[in-house]
Amino acid sequence: MSAPSLAPYIAKRPWLKKWFEPLAKWYCNAAGYRQLGLRADDLIPEENDTVQLALKRLPPKEAYDRVFRLRRAFQCSVSHQLLPKGEWTKPEDDVPYLTVVIKDIEAEMKEREDLEAMIVSKRERNAKEAH
């Protein structure tokens, strides 16, 4: 699910972060999802088993809020309108809520794979230990 990202590389270098920050803000505004009241994690496709499991693990309030945001955005899309400016998602409210759960699930799956692939062999006892 997770794709490689340059974000950690950019975040470690203040001069590079300073250069990319206006570009990132422009891109988020140009994407238009905030004008529909959505968050970035609302745009993650749900056709993945990992994402489906992450959605089931969301707290009830967060799951309800997600469904509300998606339905409201769909209604705006159908009517070819944007929300009033006061209802747009603010940048400080656009925090990841689903990505964190997805990363946890991917870590669990990797750990499970590692444990299932582990080969356990019995140690042979020395002659002294046998007696």
Image (cartoon, rainbow, N blue to C red):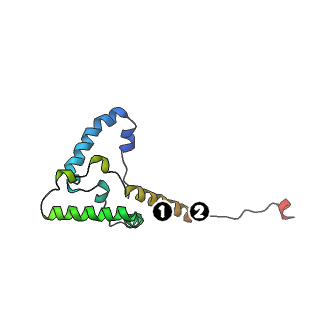
Screen quadrant of the C terminus: bottom right
Expressed as whole percent of the image width and height from the top left, the position of residue 86 reads 20, 51
Q: Quadrant of the N terminus?
A: bottom left
Q: Position of residue 89 (x, y in %)?
A: 25, 52
Q: Position of residue 28 (x, y in %)?
A: 24, 48
Q: Using the image, determine if residue 12 lies above or below residue 53.
A: above
The residue nearer to you, when weighing 5 against 72, is 72
Question: Which tag is nearer the camera, tag 1 or tag 2?
Answer: 1
Q: Secondary structure at mark 2?
A: loop
Residue 45 in sight in this render: no
The image quarter in which residue 43 lies = bottom left
Q: Residue at x 48, y 62 (%)?
A: 109
Q: Which residue is mark 2?
A: 118
Q: Earlier in the sequence, mark 1 or mark 2?
A: 1
- Residue at 32% x, 67% y is 47
Give the structural element (helix, strand or loop) at label 1.
Answer: helix
Query: Seen in the image, is 2 located left or right of residue 22?
Result: right
Q: How far from the left and from the top, in percent, is residue 54?
A: 40, 63
- For label 2, count other residues whose C-alpha is less than 10 Å away and answer few (under 14), some (14-19) or many (20+): few
Front residue of 116/75: it is 75
Residue ID at (18%, 50%)? 85
What's the residue type where badge 2 is placed? Met
Label 1 belongs to which residue? 109
Taking the spot 37% from the left edge, 50% from the top edge, the residue there is 4
Three-letter amino acid code at the position of disc 1: Met
**Residue 28 marker:** none
Between 64 and 98, which is closer to the camera in this rendering?
Answer: 64
Q: Is residue 42 left or right of residue 9?
A: left
> Do the residues under discs 1 and 2 have CB atoms within 8 angstroms?
no
10 Å neighbourhood of mark 1: few (<14), some, or many (≥20)? Answer: few
Q: CA distance from mark 1 to mark 2?
A: 14 Å
Q: Is residue 124 visible?
A: yes
